[in-house]
Amino acid sequence: MSEKHLSSSFEADLNLLSSRLLEMGGLVESQTALALAVLNEFDGALVAAVLEGEHRLNAMEIAIDEEVSHIIARRQPAARDLRFLLATSQCITNLERAGDEARKLVKRMRRIHRDGAPRAFNIAEIKISGEMALKILHKALDAFARMDAVGAAQIVREDEAVDKEFRAFVRNLVTYMMEDPRTISTGLEYLFIAKAIERIGDHATNIAESVVYVVRGTDI
């Protein structure tokens, strides 16, 4: 938090909370990057790393949320400080859910690999949307770190590009499965993968919206 407080210990509490959220965000970024690497080339070790990281994310969410509750009870904050604490709680929920989506992605890829399904689909749109979602997530965390409402508002607009790639992939996927019904099972796995990536972008956008809420006091 950039604003100064009469209580230096209160300011220290808020700064520590922000640091812990950003640490959690860094882990989600890493999880997402690993998941996208599995999308490019299956690697069982990377799958295991993502699944293990999910346990850490769950623990971090619980710990940070408990700290938010304690600070509210001890400090009884108002105005921007209260908005910051409420937004922090919302952000860690979105980070945990984004991590869930990375976990779903690698589990779907593991199933495709286990079933020996051939790479018959053009998944270029999935890869593009994945890189976009990861970029949006990074920008959202950066906006949170700096409480940059302008940058956060831009992220909200950028998420539409991820949605556009998702819709393009779905259209191509449906056409391909109609032409060759034998690909339906694998095609549905890729559909869920594409949806997971879209959701990561949505959760990143929610974080950006929380930044605008903290700084401007408006819910966009």
Image: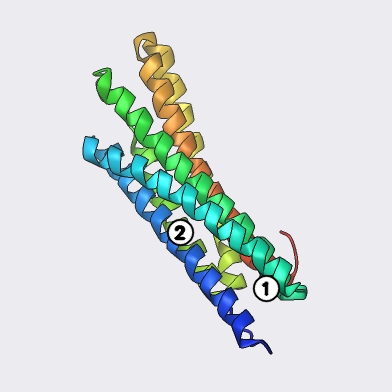
Q: Which label belongs to residue 215?
A: 1
Is tag 1's residue or tag 2's residue first in the polypeptide sequence? 2
Q: Position of residue 120 (x, y in %)?
A: 28, 23
Q: Is residue 122 above or below residue 32?
A: above
Q: Amino acid at mark 2?
A: Met
Q: Nearer the viewer, mark 1 or mark 2?
A: 2
- Secondary structure, mark 1, is helix
Q: Position of residue 164 (x, y in %)?
A: 51, 42
Question: Residue at the location (45% across, 59% down)?
Answer: 25
In this view of the protein, which residue sits in the foreground, 127 or 74? Answer: 74
Q: Is residue 178 above or below residue 158?
A: above
**Tag 1: Cα neighbours inside 10 Å, few (<14), some, or many (≥20)?**
some
Q: Amino acid at mark 1?
A: Val
Quarter of the image for the N terminus: give it.
bottom right
Q: Which label belongs to residue 134?
A: none
Q: How many numbered marks, from 0 up?
A: 2
Question: Residue at the location (56% across, 48% down)?
Answer: 202
**Tag 2: Cα neighbours inside 10 Å, few (<14), some, or many (≥20)?**
many
Question: Residue at the location (70% across, 74% down)?
Answer: 81
Q: Which label belongs to residue 24?
A: 2
Q: Position of residue 67 (x, y in %)?
A: 60, 63
Question: Residue at the location (36% across, 31% down)?
Answer: 107
- Tell me the distance, in whole angstroms, between the alpha carbons under discs 1 and 2: 21 Å
Quadrant assignment, res 123: top left
Q: Position of residue 66 (x, y in %)?
A: 60, 58
